[in-house]
């Protein structure tokens, strides 16, 4: 099996000289059958990691292009360690399952971590069923150097909703499903999560320290839902699609705290 990479080559002298170049590379994998993995394959996101680019499908796996800026990058397919709680098949169901998964770069760009929120009620969308919760699991990708199994997923943390709800009051952490998991770019134990009011469309953000189960600061309202008239389009889109957030940070040389003290 092979992977095809399309590269846009541009000239420094003129933008009109830009040309598309197609390269084909052998695809490395450690599985017996990849038929289902690439059936109706769609890319949910692209995550840069060190000298690699990761094209991720949150219901299948990762196309890992290592040395993507080199003449002959090493291309691997790595399956994601997915949960078994979800029911439902098809493109629409797959898109909604991706709302509960996140591929994150953390610890200053040195670790690639997959975070999975498994709903115990098996639903892909909507409020949780009574007397159910979720399990949040994070796993780090490790390159082993072994020719037979060149990579593996190492489990970092497993946190259940019961543990989180026991450690935090209902005011500090509403008893609902969390989604769109994103780890801190610096600390692998800090998870940024989203919560959706399924009826009104209110969208909130919460940060949790997975090492001690404690909520870090108050729950922040990101979108007011149906009452948010200023951003009606984004409210409607966010409620339907629930796209993943893109991590970013201010440049290190900007000391915003000092600027606040000396305007």
Image: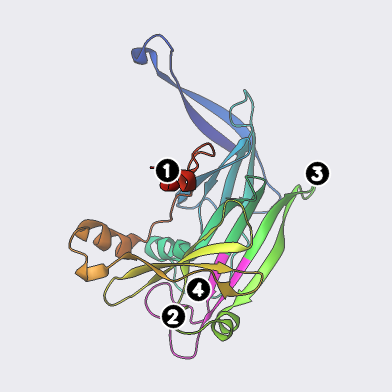
Residue 254 place in picture, x, y as percent: 49, 39
Q: Secondary structure at mark 2?
A: loop
> Which quarter of the image is occupied by the N terminus?
top right
Q: Spatial distance from mark 4 to mark 1, Cα to Cα?
A: 52 Å
Label 4 vs label 2, nearer the camera: 2
Q: Which mark is residue 174?
A: 2
Mark 1 or 2, nearer chain start: 2
Q: Which mark is residue 86?
A: 4
Write down the residue under mark 3. Answer: 145
Q: Secondary structure at mark 3?
A: loop
Q: Spatial distance from mark 3 to mark 4, Cα to Cα?
A: 33 Å
Q: Secondary structure at mark 4?
A: loop
Residue 85 place in picture, x, y as percent: 54, 75
Range drawn in magenta: 116-137
Q: Spatial distance from mark 4 to mark 2, Cα to Cα?
A: 22 Å
- Asked whether residue 123 is drawn in magenta, I would say yes
Label 3 vs label 4, nearer the camera: 3
Q: Spatial distance from mark 1 to mark 2, Cα to Cα?
A: 38 Å
Q: Is residue 181 above or below residue 170?
A: above
Q: Which mark is residue 18?
A: none
Q: Spatial distance from mark 2 to mark 3, Cα to Cα?
A: 44 Å
Mark 4 or 2, nearer chain start: 4
| Number of marks | 4
Question: Label 4: how many residues lie within 10 Å, few (<14), some (14-19) or many (20+)?
Answer: some
- Tags 4 and 2 touching, CB below 8 Å: no
Q: Spatial distance from mark 3 to mark 1, Cα to Cα?
A: 52 Å
- Tags 3 and 4 touching, CB below 8 Å: no
Mark 4 or 1, nearer chain start: 4
Q: Residue at x 46, y 61 (%)?
A: 98
Q: Which of the two residues, 253 or 246, is positioned nearer the viewer here?
A: 253
- Tags 1 and 2 touching, CB below 8 Å: no
């Amino acid at each position: 099996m092979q992977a095809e990479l399309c590269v846009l080559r541009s000239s420094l002298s003129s933008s009109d000289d830009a040309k598309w170049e197609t390269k084909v590379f052998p695809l490395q994998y450690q599985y017996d059958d990849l038929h289902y993995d690439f059936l109706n394959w769609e890319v949910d996101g692209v995550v840069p990691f060190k000298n690699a680019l990761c094209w991720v499908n949150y219901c299948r796996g990762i196309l890992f292009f290592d040395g993507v800026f080199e003449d002959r990058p090493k291309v691997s397919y790595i399956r994601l360690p997915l949960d078994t709680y979800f029911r439902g098949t098809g493109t629409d169901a797959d898109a909604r399952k991706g709302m509960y998964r996140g591929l994150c770069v953390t610890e200053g760009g040195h670790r690639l971590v997959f975070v999975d929120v498994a709903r115990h009620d098996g639903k892909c969308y909507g409020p949780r069923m009574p007397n159910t919760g979720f399990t949040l699991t994070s796993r780090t990708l490790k390159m082993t150097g072994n020719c037979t199994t060149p990579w593996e997923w190492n489990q970092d943390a497993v946190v259940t909703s019961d543990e989180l709800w026991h450690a935090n009051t209902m005011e500090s952490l509403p008893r609902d499903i969390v989604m769109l998991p994103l780890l801190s770019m610096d600390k692998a134990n800090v998870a940024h999560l989203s919560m959706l009011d399924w009826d009104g469309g209110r969208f909130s953000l919460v940060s949790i320290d997975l090492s001690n189960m404690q909520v870090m600061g108050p729950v922040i309202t990101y979108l007011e839902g149906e009452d948010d008239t200023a951003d009606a389009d984004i409210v409607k889109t966010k409620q339907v699609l629930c796209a993943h957030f893109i991590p970013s940070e201010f440049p290190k040389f900007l000391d915003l705290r000092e600027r606040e003290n000396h305007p």
